[in-house]
Amino acid sequence: MAYVALARKYRPQTFSDVSGQEIIARTLTNAINKDRIHHAYLFTGPRGVGKTSTARILAKAMVCNDGPTATPCGVCDHCRMVSDNNHPDVHEIDAATHNSVDDIRELNETAEFAPTQARAKVFVLDEVHMLSSQAWNALLKLLEEPPEHIRFIFATTEAEKILPTVLSRCQRFDFRSIDIDDIVARLREVCAGEDIAIDDSVLFRIARAADGGMRDAQTMLDQLMAIADGELTEDDVNLLLAAARGDDILAIAQALIDGNPQLCIERLDNLAAAGISSNTFVQQLLDHFRQLLLLQTCGPDSSAVKRLGMVTDTAQQQAKALPMERLLRICQIFIGAQQSIRGGVDPHLQLEMCFVRIAGLATTIELDNLIRQLQRLEQQSGGASRHPLQGR
């Protein structure tokens, strides 16, 4: 059998398979069960979170032999043709390339005819924000007074670009970024299906790097399977992402806490020689100290902490050792470094400056606190000396 990408091979086939979008799945399921299927839906949200997959499942639900049903069988001719994208009554259109008035006029002409095999004719328009204003205006009349057999499903990452007159005629569903735990759970299922041995720490790294996108996570896992020889390890993830190892991040963080910039700069040189991306490295350091900040604020069991990856014992010890004010300043310094790097500053130089500034924070903060204490004492003594005069 020909190779199939994991993101396609493990594409959700039912509403319950769509990770992280339980409210949307429940709403669509109830709408189908209560025979309240709207004529136009708008699915919007970040890339790779299940918009197109949900649109295909909804199309199957409407044309399945058992339908309309919230649980399409997936094996009838209608379901299989939708999966293979060759159903005569289910038209999946890429609006990024078919966005002209002529394309929409052709769609309107197709919509006039009754479905040939299914009970409904379904149009799935992906990247629909790419349609021109003239194309939308050509489609508007059909949206206002659609034939009974027509259903529209629009998918987009940029709903703000769609005309308000169109939005008012659609039921809108906002897909959210998928939580790390949901991505990890799905990746575990994929690894089990592929008979792949992998540690949870690696899955968390992949899920974190995917930034809420299931498709991106599955694509990274696919790449790792090509890189690795046998069991997938964290070193393989670092190689894929051009990232530093977790031990390096912990060691540099500890050196910064101890006020040792020399050790940090020496490790930075070694990592740069190994091909580590400076942008990725800055983000890793910022994520680490952000996790320490959240550990102090929310505790190790918080979802906000887990969203940044697994919590190590070393990280918990570092969080306890750092005062909150110092942590805040460290995060601010790394955020400033990111902005400077985007502005064209040499990343290596920017990191060296960050290390020197952060390593000296303990002394700087103590000096700042001492100055503030002296100022308060001076104000109090000045107030006491003026008080007798004010009483005369």
Image (tube, helix red, strand yellow):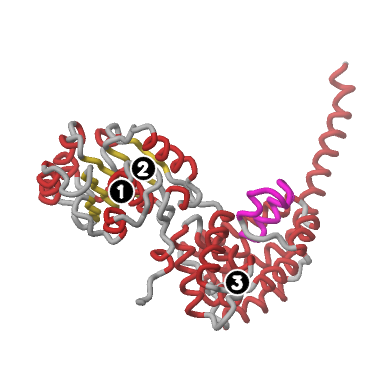
- The residue drawn where x is 74% and y is 61% is 315
Which comes sooner in the sequence, label 2 or label 1? 1
From the viewer's side, name the closer residue of 298 and 150.
150
Q: Are marks 3 and 2 in contact (CB under 8 Å)?
A: no
- Check contact, mark 2 vs mark 1: CB within 8 A: yes
Q: Amino acid at mark 1?
A: Cys
- Report the mark closest to the observer, 3 or 2: 2
Dominant secondary structure of the residues highlighted in magenta in the image:
helix
Magenta stretch bounds: 287-307
Check the image and report above or below for 177 versus 10. above
- In the displayed structure, does residue 5 sit left or right of residue 178? left
Q: Which residue is mark 2?
A: 69
Helix, strand or loop at label 1? It is loop
Q: Label 3: which residue?
A: 198
Residue 270 x/y as whole percent:
63, 81
Q: Which residue is mark 1?
A: 64
Residue 281: where, in percent of width, then height? Answer: 58, 69
Residues at discs 3 and 1 in contact (Cβ within 8 Å): no
